[in-house]
Image: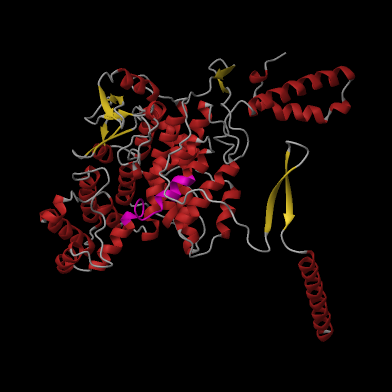
Amino acid sequence: RTPPHLIPRDCCPFVLQLGRQRHQRSPMAVTCVAGIAIAAASGLVGFVFGRQASSNDEPGTGPSFRKGPSFRKAPEGRAEVVPPPKHPEIPEGAPATAEARKRVDDEGDKVAVLALPGGKMHEIKILRPQYGDDLFLDIRDLNAKTGYFTFDPGFTCTASCASSITFIDGPKGVCLYRGYPVAELCERGEALEVAYLLLVGTLPNDEELDVFKKEVSRHMIVHTKIQAMYQNFTLNAHPMAIMVSVVGGLSCVFSELDCQDTTHRWLACTRLIAKMPVLAAMAYKTSIGQPFMYPKTKYSFAENFLQMMFATPLEEYEVNPVHAKAVEAFMILHMDHEQNASTSTVRIAGSSQANPYACIAAGIACLWGPAHGGANEAVIQMLEQIGVKENVEQFVADVKAKKDGVRLMGFGHRVYKNYDPRAKFAKVLVQQVLGDLGMQDPMLEVAMELERIALQDEYFTKRKLYPNVDFYTGIMLRAIGIPTSMFTVMFAMSRTVGWVSHWREMVSEGQMRIGRPRQIYGGIAERSFQPRRGGWSLRRRNSLGNSDSMEKVASFSQSQAQAEIRERAFGHRHSMVNIELETKQTR
């Protein structure tokens, strides 16, 4: 009669040992042992299916349900039930997005009037966000009431959702994570501390941060089946191609997730944050043909990544603290950036209730493009093309003349019409990193000269072309030894925090609506299909009064069919003769 969740795990080996000796016991002993064994089995089942596959079960594929109670020794020597840890949700003071949207709708007392052809007027509610000067027109009922759609390629003027994670003011050059300036978080915070902030909405205290770090550390183990996938990639495979495949493969290992369960959602987020640096380092090791290095609990999040990237089994690896700080700052800078292309991709994929690991794989694929995550790699290539500082003026002249093959990379942004606030910190950071390492990179001199000339030229300032975050981060990554092919992977590793935060926010709202943009059709009008000669056609025949039936008719003649059959039969006999001749010659 003991409740299953109160059966200690330590009694199971003892019960099993008694079970093995049951043939030596009396009938009453056998009955007692059977009762204990049943209770133990019930307790074991309750323990297995009442906990999450997180700590010792990682990287198991079992059900990832809520962690059940565990036991610890009380001062009096009695077993004390320890309640399962509660995974954080959006706390008080950081309202859920659905509530924030409701307040935004309630404040929309002003309307805009749309004049339609025929004299019809349509009122559009004006929405004002909780923070910022932007105003939005609520057109959700536009088609239902007017029959019209809107046309906005690239969604440059369209808000697809309401979110409380990141705020951007492009004209003023402001970027906030949950209300905190990104530069301050980079300068004073840790990567996992900011990750917790984006996921939960508030900064963690010391105890919460310690628990979160341990949870992430336990999830850094990668299933052996996932590791085996790397054996099938060639040495010249791009690391981003590997990442798309492997992260998508995680959905095979963790396929039991229930997106409606808050514990499952938290588990998926922490798993992805923890495993991305490991998978990224494995992708790099695969590309250079070196053995994998596994994470160690003594290292921090950034130190573990550097250790897995550059350590070898031959000797101990000493992590350079300057390199670790640079990786931490890089990750915080790139963790989130509102509704960019890859984040929107993750949201659209998640709106179909797809597996979260598959959604993140879709985001990685989108990030791979040179117009998005591959921009810092393109900046390095551009600086290498310029060569030395003396060639900058000629390069700028070629850009203004729109010379073939010459493009200015790392300048301008879809959102910012001012200096990117992340770029300001990145410029200072790269100078600090190079100074601490005692390095002088000629590429930095070229970059700073290019920035100086461009900001003084009316051609660029008139077009609001200012350096963005990708302009300087590539130089910093190169200084700490990160190869150019891994730049975008580093971006994906960092942006995963933002992706899972947006996915968790979207699913937690309970108002998921599948993404379904419309289009303006520019193709050919309806036309009838004319079957080719010798193909198949369908003919409608009216039979049995008013009933219609479809009859499939072969359009080629019977003589043509017989000729084709004879030709195939002759070809088969001819091939069999050739095989017999080759066999005789071999003998």
Residue 408 percent across, percent down from the top left: 24, 59
Q: Quadrant of residue 141?
A: top left
Residue 365 percent across, percent down from the top left: 45, 50
Residue 168 percent across, percent down from the top left: 26, 36
Farthest bottom residue? 585
What are the residue bounds of the magenta stretch?
361-376
- Does 341 sit left or right of 449 as displayed? right
| Magenta-drawn stretch contains 570 | no
| Magenta-drawn stretch contains 372 | yes
Q: Quadrant of the N terminus?
A: top right
| Residue 300 visible in the displayed image | no
- Please name the residue shown 18% across and 38% down the image: 172
Q: Quadrant of residue 57?
A: top right
Which is nearer the eye, 532 or 269? 532
Which is nearer the eye, 156 or 571? 571
Report the number of discs.
Answer: 0
Farthest front residue? 545
- Does 146 sit left or right of 219 as displayed? left
| Residue 581 visible in the displayed image | yes
Q: Quadrant of the C terminus?
A: bottom right
Rendering colour mode? secondary structure
Residue 144 percent across, percent down from the top left: 42, 27
